[in-house]
Every structure is written in structure tokens, then in C-alpha cells.
Image (cartoon, helix red, strand yellow):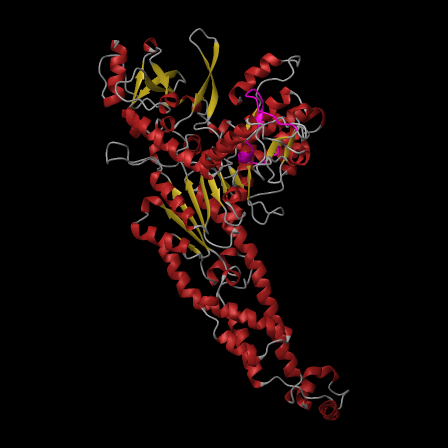
Amino acid sequence: MEPDLRDHVAFYLTGKMSGSGLGSIEGLGFRPAMLARFRDLTTIRYDYPLVLIDDAADGAFAVSLSGLFDDMLSEVAQGVDAERMRHHAVRLECEIRKGLAAGAGRTLSTLWDQAEQSLVNGGDSLLEESLARLRASLRVDGHVFGCDRNLPAVLFTHAWRTVQEKKARRTRGLIDRLILKLSEILRADDANSADALTPEHLRACVGRGFADEFDFEALSRLLTTSKPMVALSDSRRARIQRLLSTLESQAFFPAPAASDRAETERTGYSFFFRSCADALDAYRERLPHMIETATAMAVAELEVDGSYREGVHDAMFEAFGADEFGPAELAQFPDYLVHIDTIAMTAAESVSLTEVLSADLPMKILVQIDDLVAPPLGTNGHGSPGARARQIAHAAIGIGGVFILQATSSHLYRLRDKILRGQAFDGPALFSIYSGAGSSTGDLPPYLASAAALESRAFPVFTFDPSAGPDWASRFSLEFNPQADRDWPAHDLVYEEESLQRASADVAFTLVDFLACDPRYDRFFARVPKEKWNGTMIPVADCVTKDHEGLPDKVPYVLLADTDNDLHRVIVVKKLIREARRCRDHWRSLQELGGIHNSHAERLVAQEREAWEKRAQSGTEVRTAEQATAGEISPAPGLAPDAVSLAPAGQAETKRSDDPYIETPRCSSCNECIKINDRMFKYDRNKQAYIADIEAGTYAQLVQASESCQVAVIHPGKPRNPNETGLEELRKRAEPFV
């Protein structure tokens, strides 16, 4: 073994540096090469900061600052000065980002004023005119928040209020209507009573201005003798009075004296808690009042309609208790919002969390994780990155009736519709969010730290929505993960060689890259001088796929960049490779839940293909024209063919190895191939794609469909037409999918 390789292998196996070739990365501010160009986020247009909006007409509760500027520019950047408007808008947006980063005013209008004042000091009249036009097109305002530690709590609280205030307006309106109608019943009964027809009462009703114009004695005798007396029974009057007292005193939906939200929350119950135990105690204490209010609303509806029957309904509502208080009744009342920080999460709190989720209570629980990988490996046994955080969400999946969103802060804006859906879910919802704001991520801002956790599969995004459909395919989704069909996302890294020539490499972002962001893990990395780079060093992603025992002949490395953006190869210890394999295996289990590379489906496809080929070889495989049109194979009804060419009616056909085909049972119905050529590609009765007519399209369309398929189930095979243009390039593009 060469001396350099011997030193590298020794570090890989033991974590100890030997020889003079390796160097420590501690304190050097290294970060993954893919993140090197994002040193200053204030100069980059991305999803953050966000503007939180109250009572938006379209139901939106947050808007991206960049999206807001894009909308304004689409309105004002017209004509010959469009480019100038765009340039000035980008300058203003950048200045607003800088002001927010510096801790300036938190509302958009304040930040805008400060940024505008900073820009126009030079007396540029064109700039002033551009900013004035932009300001005239700004139609929203609200508090502005960047992607920091406070973002998850602020964003989810705002989304929760958006949903709950809408519910409160609806239920409060119903209560107000019932109070009004019940009061009218009492007033009508009072107006029809003997006391209301006395001369004195009639005189008081008319007033002094016309007191001398009427004979109230005669009017009283006339009304008394001519109007039938139909009065409320004592029991009904008492019941209506009790209903009014209950509805007017309930504290779930207080009637605000003004439009002040704080005053409304002060006079009613609070539904925001910092622990599940406290929320449970409040729920149990308020449950009798909830039942009383719900019962009063139901009885009041019957009274207003005149359909309450004491002989029937008295006994029914007297027996109404917690067992009869179901989802429909719960849906009328506010949901509870619980914000839990995992740093302070105790074993007792974990038990309370499980109880809340299992009991189907109307609680929305935000679990915020700031430090994803503590403790470092090797200090307290095995501390698998994200293990504790993953346990929370996975345990909730096992319960079944819980809406679950696991996500990172970097993607919360893109997941805003899912957030609202979870907040509006009729039942418990769990939001497990990694903020990226822990001290473990070095100088990385929370946005990049949380994005790195997502890219590396350390903390994947997934949703589980029990209300989305009857099966896993409709309930569980991995759609927001980058390159979800692969073990690790890979991106093109462009860099400059020492010869000043432009170069690029396809670099996978693995768990080890994410751990390289954490200074606590610096001792598990060693940098190799450029003159020592050689063929015995392989990327971590390649090493993870090999389960090598004994002395390795190659050592894994990651590409890191220093503060000057110089590129370094940094080798890693074997412990991190084991953790990367564990992370990959966990990701693959999520892929299976999401229908990606599902082992059951792949096994079924292989079995059906083998059986089909055996039948075809024996000359018994015959398709009828009707079956070919429906995309079915006669010996296996309901299964769409994975061969692309369908034989004419009455003919047997053996699938050639060069034939294109679709793994139909794995099709996600994304519609991409249908858009390319709806005569070549069609859906079967399960809305899964198969190749209906191979002659209806070109090989180029087959390759294009393979590239656009979200789950990589289209295999283009080899070209059928040797004269098709561009075949050499098409063959190269098809290689990953053949």
C-alpha cells in the first residue's frame, strides 16, 4: 500500500491522522462546495423574507417578498422603460432584505420607507420615479420575517389564526343569529301578554307626542277582546331564557366590543399553549362548557324553527354528554395550537403528545427542532442524525388519523397550501419542523442549514393527509423532496481550475455533506492537499453504495470550500459512512411508502413479466383487439402491459429485449407522457400509463417522456427507425433509462 493511501486508510478506519499529508478543518469555516456561492443571502432572490397578510381576499396568509415584487413588475414594467423598472426594483428589494437583516422595522411599509430613503439620497430622478410607480402598485402590507429561529412559530401561528378566525366568524354569526331569534320569540310573547295590552303600557309605547290623540282605555279593551291570547308555556320560556344565558355567556367565541384582536382574545379563552399537558388540562376543564354550548346551539335551532318537542327532545338532550360529542360538534369550536421546542421536551410531554394525537383531539401541534444531529457521534454512543425528530413523525403515522407535515424551514413557503390544509383538518395535526437555527450549523444561516438537511435526506419533507383519499397513494406524499427517485440529489458544480479553465462535475449531496456543516463534526474530516489527490479517493456517494469489509482500496471524500471559495477534497471516517447508509436506508423506506421503487410493486411486475414471457414463448399469449385497446393482458386482467408494442388481434407476440416499455403498476399518473403524445401513450382503467401505439410517435418522444417521467418508469429501449434524425444523441440520452 502506498504511503499516502496508508495514511488515508488509517484516518478512515480510526479517525486519527498520521503522516504529514493530512490537515484538520477545525476553525477554517469550510462548507459543502454546493453552498459556497451563497455567502450573502441578502443579494439573492429566493423565497424569503415573507410578508404575513391579514384577511387576504384570495385566502393567502403569506407572500414571498420576491413574488410580491414580481407581481408589481408585471403590472408596471411595461414599454420602453421596463428594463429600467426591473433594475430599480431589484435594487429596492435588495435594500429591503439588508434592512431586515440589520434589524430594521418589521412591517413592509416601514422597511420600504427606510430602503427608499437610503436609495434616493443621490438625487436620481429616474430612480425616484421608478420607486414611486412601484409604491403605487403595492396593495398589501404586513409584518416581514426572514428564515430564522422564530419563523416556524410565527408562520404557523399566523396560519392557525387565519383558519380559526374564519371559523370563529362563521360560528359567531350562527350564535348571534340564534340569540336574535330567541330574543324575538320572547319579545313577541311579551307583546302578546295581558300586561302588554294595559292602557298604561300602550300609552308608554306611543310616547308623549301623541298621548292626547288616543283613548288608551278603549284601545286596551279592543285589543284584549279581539286578539287571541297564545302565550309561551312556562317551561318553554324558561328553556329559551336558559339558552340565551348560555349563548351570551360562552367564552369560546366572545363578541368583541371593537375590532381589536387582542381585546377579543383577552375576554375569551386562550387556545395557544407551550405544552401538550397544559393544552390537555385546558381541554378537559372546558369540555363541559363545550358540551353545554353545543347543546344550547342545537336546541336553539329547534326552538327557532318551532320544531322542539318536549316529550321527545328533553330526554335526548339531557343524555347528551362527552360520548355524543363527536367530530361534527368539535368542528364548530376553535382548535388548540401547541408549540413545543424539542430542547425542553420531557418524557412526560412525549406521553401527553401521544395522548393528544391518539385521542383525536382538535389540536394542531408544532414541534420545532433546532439541533438535528446532537449529540455528535462517538461522544454518547450512537446519535443518529434526525433520529429523535423522525420518531415523532413516524409514531404519528402509525396512529393513522393524524395530519402530518414534516418539513424544513427552507420549504415552508412552498408548503403553505399544505400548512393551511393541516390547520383546517378536522382532527389532530402534527407539524414537525427543522428550523436550521441551532448553534450546530456554524456560520450557515438557518435557510441554508435547513435546505441542506432536506437535500441530504437527513430531514426529508413528507405529508400524510388522512382526508386526501382511502389509500397510501393518495394520503402519503414525498413530492417536495429534490430528485425524490434517487438516493441522493445530484447537481452540477461549476468551478475554475488552476489553469483558469471552466470545469464542472456532477456532485451528489449526501448526509456527510450536511454533517460537514457542523463544527462539532470537524474531527471526523481531514483535508488532503491538492498534490496528493489521486485515483484512490472516491466520492462519498459512491462509497456508500459499496459495503466493503477489510482494508479498503479507496477512501471516500467530500468537496468542501473555504472562506475564499477554494475547493478542497476532505476525506471522512468510516463512522460517517455508516450513518450515511443508515440515512439512505431510512430514505428508501420513505420512498416505498411514497410509491417510489416500491419493492412489492417491483416484485409483482417482475413476476408478471416472467409469467407473461413464459406464456409468450409457449405460443399461448394472444391479445384480442378489445384487450389491446384497454391495455390489458388476457391471463392477468386489470394489469396494463409493460411491453410497448401490442400485437394485432389474434396474433401472438414475444416481447423483445430491445422493445421500449412502461412499468405501468408504478406509474404515478403525472400526465407528462400523455402531454408529449396522447396517441402513443394512454392510460388504462387504473389511470396508469402504457404504450398504446409505438408507431404513433418517434424515438425522440420516447426519450423525452423517459426524461420527464417523475418516477422513471418509462424505458425507451432501442430506436425502431434507423433513419430518425439525431439518433446518436438520443441513444446517449436514453442510456440511463434503458
Count of marks placed on residues: 0
Q: Nearer the viewer, residue 154 or 502?
A: 502
Residue 155 drawn at (x, y percent): 48, 44
Residue 140 drawn at (x, y percent): 60, 43
499 relative to 342 in the view: left or right: right
Whether residue 154 is visible to the viewer of this picture, yes or no, is yes
Residue positioned most to the right: 213
Q: Which residues are magenta?
A: 651-672
User: Residue 280: which quarter of the image?
Assistant: bottom left
689 relative to 555 in the view: left or right: right
Whether residue 596 is visible to the viewer of this picture, yes or no, is no
531 relative to 139 in the view: left or right: left
> Predominant secondary structure in magenta?
loop
Residue 317 drawn at (x, y percent): 51, 74
Residue at point 44%, 58% (across, down)? 270
Q: Nearer the viewer, residue 322 or 281?
A: 322
User: Is residue 670 a member of the stretch shown in magenta?
Assistant: yes
Q: Is residue 417 above or below residue 506?
A: below
Residue at point 59%, 40% (across, down)? 686
User: Residue 633: which quarter of the image?
Assistant: top right
Q: Is residue 706 above or below residue 254?
A: above
Q: Quadrant of the N terminus?
A: top left
Residue at point 56%, 28% (across, down)? 616
User: Residue 649: which quarter of the image?
Assistant: top right
User: Is residue 323 a member of the stretch shown in magenta?
Assistant: no
Residue 374 drawn at (x, y percent): 31, 36
Q: Is residue 418 above or below residue 609?
A: below
Q: Nearer the viewer, residue 608 or 465?
A: 608
625 relative to 336 in the view: left or right: right
Residue positioned most to the top: 499
